[in-house]
Image (tube, helix red, strand yellow):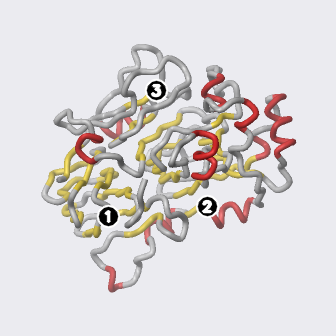
Amino acid sequence: MIAKLLPNRVRRTYLGGGRIDAFTGTEADVSDGVPRPEDWMASTVTAFNGTLEIAGEGLGRLEDGQLVKDVAGSLPILVKLLDSDERLVIQAHPTVPCAKRLFDSPVGKTECWYFLPGTAPDACVYLGFKPGVTRAAWEKAFERQQGLLEMLHRIPVAAGDFVFVDGGMPHAIGGGCFMIELQEPSDLMVVAERYTPSGRQIPDAKMHGGIGWEKMFAVYEYEGRTFEETCARYVRKRSQTSNGRNSSSDTKGKAKQICGPELTDKFEMWRVAGDESLDLPRPANVAVVTGGAGEANGLAVTKGDRLLVAGERTLAVNGDATLVVCAAPRGSVV
């Protein structure tokens, strides 16, 4: 089965969403004044906003109205479109051991970002502690709400770039970023800043993730690296993501891997262009048509479509469409 997904916009505290509107051709309803800068395609988990919760917010649906979780069961990944008009607040997500210990969750929230056309020329992200940052120094900066951003590396990004974010790493997405975000299937996080750059206050429960002020600092991994070390380990520029690992002549017609086991055992990301195919690693996979138009396993697709591909062994793309496919690795379990 291959099916298109309905828009699934989710409330967040930061401003954005216009690039998603333009990309998908569908505007989000923000009549309540709350930004919806993310689209949680094929999601089988609910969103946590730390305020008045909306029942079922975050759950994805197929075009025929069926919930993805009723069709595909629990997906071991969560895939989003994310558009930031302002810098997001500094945050960190738990590793699996931390999630089990502090959040009573079987999954953490290791994630990665693939930047799409429309990302601003001056876009950047903030990633990882600089050398010498200790828990005591981080807690002191948090209490004062001063100097937090200066403890992280500022990394310029552009369309086609890829950034991997380990569980426990402090990070903040800068303004002007438009991306596919692939992660473990949870909304677990702790937040270091009380206000967004535009002045929206973050609810306390959202800041400490429901685990309390003391425990929240145990979510961070206090391992500082130089700028060069951070980029070498976690950043892939456009030339690397375009060529992937399959650049030799004997892989002509095959998909290019953007993220794989050299980085993580949590998920994989592939780029499939026209007249290429991908042996799908999981019974259920999520795809985004990032450009062009054509067919994917016989289904007519165009830029902005989001797809659930379930029970298919191969994904074959025809025409000039380009898809980014997200999946959990073979043999992985939730």
The alpha-carbon separation of the residues under discs 2 and 1 comes to 22 Å
- Image location of residue 172, percent across then percent down: 63, 42
The foreground one among 63 and 311 is 311
Residue drawn 44% across the image and 35% down it: 38
Residue 272's label in the rendered image is: 1
Residue 90's quadrant in the figure? top right
The foreground one among 200 and 222 is 222
Q: Indicate whether 112 appears above or below 270.
A: above
The alpha-carbon separation of the residues under discs 3 and 2 comes to 28 Å
Callout 2: SS: helix
Question: Of all residues shown, which one is farthest toward the top?
Answer: 32
Residue 187 shown left or right of residue 41 in the figure: right
Asked whether residue 122 is in view, the answer is no
Residue at the disc numbered 2: 234
- Image location of residue 145, percent across then percent down: 79, 29
Give yes or no for contact between labels 2 and 1 (Cβ–Cβ under 8 Å).
Answer: no
Badge 1 amino acid: Val
- Image location of residue 332, percent across then percent down: 42, 62
Badge 3 amino acid: Arg
Residue drawn 66% across the image and 34% down it: 191
Residue 11's label in the rendered image is: 3
The foreground one among 286 and 186 is 186
Label 1 neighbour load within 10 Å: few <14, some 14-19, many 20+: many
Residue 63 shown left or right of residue 188 in the figure: left
Tell which circle, 3 or 2, labels the residue nearer the N-terminal end.
Answer: 3
Residue drawn 79% across the image and 43% down it: 150
Residue drawn 79% across the image and 33% down it: 142
Asked whether residue 138 is in view, the answer is yes
